[in-house]
Amino acid sequence: MKKIFTILSLTCSCLYLSTAMAQNRYRDQNIAVGMGGITGKKGYFISLGYQQIVGFQGWNIKLDGIYANQYAKISNDIPLESKLPMQHYMILPSALYTFDQWGLDPFYFNLYGGAMLGYEVLNNGKKVLTNSNLESENIKNSFIYGISLGTIIEAELTRNLTLGVDARQLYRRGSKAGEFTFYLGAGIRYYIN
């Protein structure tokens, strides 16, 4: 119990100090983000986003649009070799905190979390599998929702341009292909003003 209290106290103290001492490198800036990468379901994703400071030191709001293409086995009545193509179209509003006061210039560390809303298309919208005549009632398009947690590590290339690596975990409800998916990507973050 004493160790847990000590760890919680240190964590709260660090968060308080980081908030109080934030240099806020991004004050009054808008950020355009473009990323691409791989998913945990043997696929790829493309993400376009927008980020803006909200007036608090270190805090940003972020909105991402993601297209993901991956493969999944969705039920036992579909043969194992027939993994279905699956596309996700998602919007992810998030709150992001930037830890830029650690003195690690030109590297910056960000944590974020938020909601996820989207649409899932299975087997390119077809009810019948392409390599057999098997039809499944489980092949349905559906709305999906959930949460997203992640981290972005940035390396400053110029004053207005950084290279970012993004690791994100999605928890999806309503998906036929499972609830958890990991995304790992890299891309450019351009500071507009």
Image: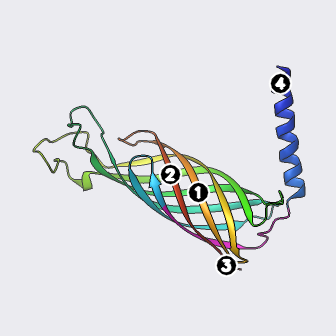
Q: Give the residue type at disc 2.
A: Tyr
Answer few, some or many: residues within 10 Å of disc 2's Cα (few below 14, many 20 plus, some between 14 and 19). many
Answer few, some or many: residues within 10 Å of disc 1's Cα (few below 14, many 20 plus, some between 14 and 19). many
**Alpha-carbon span between mark 3 and mark 2:** 26 Å
- The numbered mark at residue 186 is none
**Alpha-carbon span between mark 2 and mark 4:** 33 Å
- The numbered mark at residue 3 is 4
Point out the tag, 4 or 3, that comes first from the N-terminus: 4
Q: In the rendered view, does 192 fall on the left or right side of 68? A: right
Q: In the rendered view, does 34 fall on the left or right side of 110? A: left
Are the residues flagged by discs 1 and 2 in contact, CB closer than 8 Å? Answer: yes
The residue mark sitting in front, 1 or 3, is: 1
Secondary structure at numbered mark 4: helix
Task: Give percent across and percent down for residue 6.
Answer: 86, 29
Q: Residue at x 30, y 40 (%)?
A: 73
Question: For residue 132, which quarter of the picture?
Answer: top left
Q: Residue at x 77, y 73 (%)?
A: 28
Q: Quadrant of the C terminus?
A: bottom right
Q: In the rendered view, does 191 fall on the left or right side of 179? A: right
**Alpha-carbon span between mark 4 and mark 1:** 32 Å
The residue mark sitting in front, 4 or 3, is: 4
Task: Give percent across and percent down for residue 148.
Answer: 57, 48
Are the residues flagged by discs 4 and 3 in contact, CB closer than 8 Å? Answer: no
Task: Give percent across and percent down for residue 95.
Answer: 67, 55
Secondary structure at numbered mark 3: loop
Residue with the mark numbered 3: 192
In magenta stretch: residue 30: yes
Answer few, some or many: residues within 10 Å of disc 4's Cα (few below 14, many 20 plus, some between 14 and 19). few
Q: What are the residue bounds of the magenta stretch?
A: 23-36
Point out the tag, 2 or 4, that comes first from the N-terminus: 4
Residue with the mark numbered 2: 183
Q: Is residue 150 above or below residue 13?
A: below
